[in-house]
């Protein structure tokens, strides 16, 4: 007789496995379960299944792992478990048998398990390792209140093929998934993020456009840089010009938004190009250049752009040269539509 508790949430009950459960559940193992757990055959042979049930009792006795039958309206519908991987950290796993799928049983069972495990097993964190193609399980983890934390490249082998793994996790002190902040944080962890770059067009009273000769690449470029987290593009360009050139500028009109497709290992990025105004030509000579990034600055005109800047920037600068007000929308330096 095990002292493992029974957990309840309305019609959903998590209870310890019993040897008698094998008859009703063994043949419910389907190819979907075999696929994601990399089981060699489905259903498992009877002796193996019984030994597995006995194993769950031994693991609980040593508090290494808690495995529960998921009962739905009195019928065994699946299994969930949490394995104590190291003190304070539990690793979750789950399966719902085919006839019971699609009714919200999995995520409710996982959430019930997690909230019990935080208290009863004194866990500080739970996590799940899910194949990115296992969309039902990724959704199960998220709806259970775990956040997507990262992707481990090629750390697992499934059906003989090396695969990536998504890590999803929940901390004991995270806002509860039923609160607005908890829900938003979960959703936020799954949404795509894009790189933003802010650059500026600084002109001289004699008509030149300022370009930076950089230490780390051949092509000259507009001053500016990558927008930090929680920083606005306008604040970024002002900061970058201060850091790179030691010049104080104001971000004026937004001249162009230029989306750059992925290139040579770089992810795609959106460039915001601001008007930084017009200064006397000697402003360039007064600039103090950040030596580890900027070798020199140059006042340039259309003749320089063909040879000195990257092709997408040459397209952008030519457009800006003809530009008479408003904000251009470009993709790779070219107008759309
Ligand atoms: C993953 C599994 C447990 C889901 O069981 P379930 O009870 O059907 O899941 P739920 O009804 O709670 O649904 C959870 C979410 O997954 C979504 N979902 C279910 N099946 C899906 C599918 N085939 N593709 C995409 N999403 C799916 C549901 O829509 C729901 O998301 P939503 O609430 O945003 O709509 C079940 O498919 C299973 O046992 N799979 C095989 C075992 C497995 O993969 N275990 C995990 C190994 S890490």
Image (cartoon, rainbow, N blue to C red):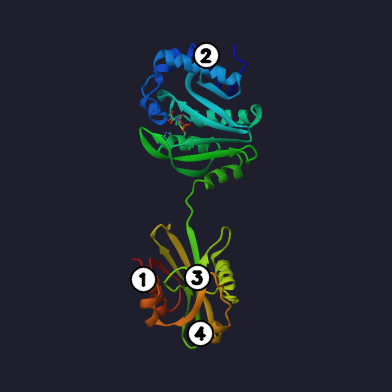
Q: Which mark is residue 311?
A: 1
Q: Earlier in the sequence, mark 2 or mark 1?
A: 2
Q: Position of residue 285 (x, y in %)?
A: 55, 84
Q: Mark 3 and mark 1 in contact (Cβ < 8 Å)? A: no
As measured in the structure, the alpha-carbon distance from the residue carrying label 1 to the one carrying label 3 is: 16 Å
**Mark 1 or 3, closer to the camera:** 1
Badge 1, how many Cα within 10 Å: few under 14, some, many 20+? some
Residue drawn 52% across the image and 13% down it: 18
Q: Mark 4 and mark 3 in contact (Cβ < 8 Å)? A: no
Q: Is residue 105 above or below residue 306?
A: above
As measured in the structure, the alpha-carbon distance from the residue carrying label 4 to the one carrying label 2 is: 82 Å
Q: Mark 4 and mark 1 in contact (Cβ < 8 Å)? A: no
Q: Mark 1 and mark 2 in contact (Cβ < 8 Å)? A: no
Q: Nearer the viewer, residue 247 or 97?
A: 247
Which residue is under mark 4? Answer: 204
The residue at label 4 has a CB less than 8 Å from ligand 1: no
Which residue is under mark 3? Answer: 199
Badge 2, how many Cα within 10 Å: few under 14, some, many 20+? some
Badge 4, how many Cα within 10 Å: few under 14, some, many 20+? some
Q: Earlier in the sequence, mark 1 or mark 3?
A: 3
Does the image show residue 280? no
Which quadrant is the N terminus positioned in? top right
**Mark 2 or 1, closer to the camera:** 1
Q: Position of residue 116 (x, y in %)?
A: 62, 28
Q: Position of residue 119 (x, y in %)?
A: 66, 29
Q: Is residue 165 above or below residue 104?
A: below
Which residue is under mark 2? Answer: 18
As measured in the structure, the alpha-carbon distance from the residue carrying label 1 to the one carrying label 4 is: 23 Å
């Amino acid at each position: 007789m095990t002292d493992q508790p029974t957990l309840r949430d309305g019609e959903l009950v998590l209870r310890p496995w019993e040897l008698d459960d094998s008859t009703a559940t063994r043949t419910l193992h389907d190819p979907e379960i075999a696929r994601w757990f990399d089981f060699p055959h489905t259903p498992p042979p009877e002796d193996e299944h019984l030994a597995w049930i006995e194993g769950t009792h031994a693991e609980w006795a040593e508090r290494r792992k808690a495995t529960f039958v998921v009962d739905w309206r009195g019928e065994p519908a699946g299994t969930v478990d949490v394995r104590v991987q190291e003190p304070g950290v539990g690793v979750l796993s789950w399966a719902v048998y085919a006839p019971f799928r699609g009714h919200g049983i999995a995520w409710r069972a996982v959430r019930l398990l997690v909230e019990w495990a935080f208290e009863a097993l004194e866990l500080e964190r739970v996590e799940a390792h899910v194949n990115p193609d296992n969309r039902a399980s990724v959704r199960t983890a998220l709806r259970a209140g775990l956040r997507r934390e990262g992707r481990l490249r090629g750390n697992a082998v499934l059906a003989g093929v090396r695969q990536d793994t998504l890590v999803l996790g929940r901390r004991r002190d995270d806002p509860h998934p039923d609160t607005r902040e908890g829900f938003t944080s979960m959703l936020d962890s799954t949404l795509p993020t894009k790189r933003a770059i802010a650059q500026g067009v600084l002109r001289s009273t004699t008509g030149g456009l300022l370009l930076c000769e950089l230490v780390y690449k051949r092509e000259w470029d507009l001053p500016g840089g990558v927008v930090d987290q929680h920083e606005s593009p306008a604040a970024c360009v002002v900061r970058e010009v201060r850091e790179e050139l030691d010049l104080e500028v104001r971000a004026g009109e937004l001249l162009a938004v230029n989306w750059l497709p992925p290139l040579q290992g770089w992810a795609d990025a959106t460039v915001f190009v601001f008007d930084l105004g017009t200064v006397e030509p000697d402003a360039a000579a007064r600039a103090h250049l950040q030596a580890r990034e900027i070798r020199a600055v140059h006042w340039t005109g259309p003749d320089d752009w063909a040879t000195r800047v990257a092709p997408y920037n040459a397209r952008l600068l030519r457009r800006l040269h003809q530009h008479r007000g408003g904000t251009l929308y470009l993709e790779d330096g070219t107008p759309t539509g």
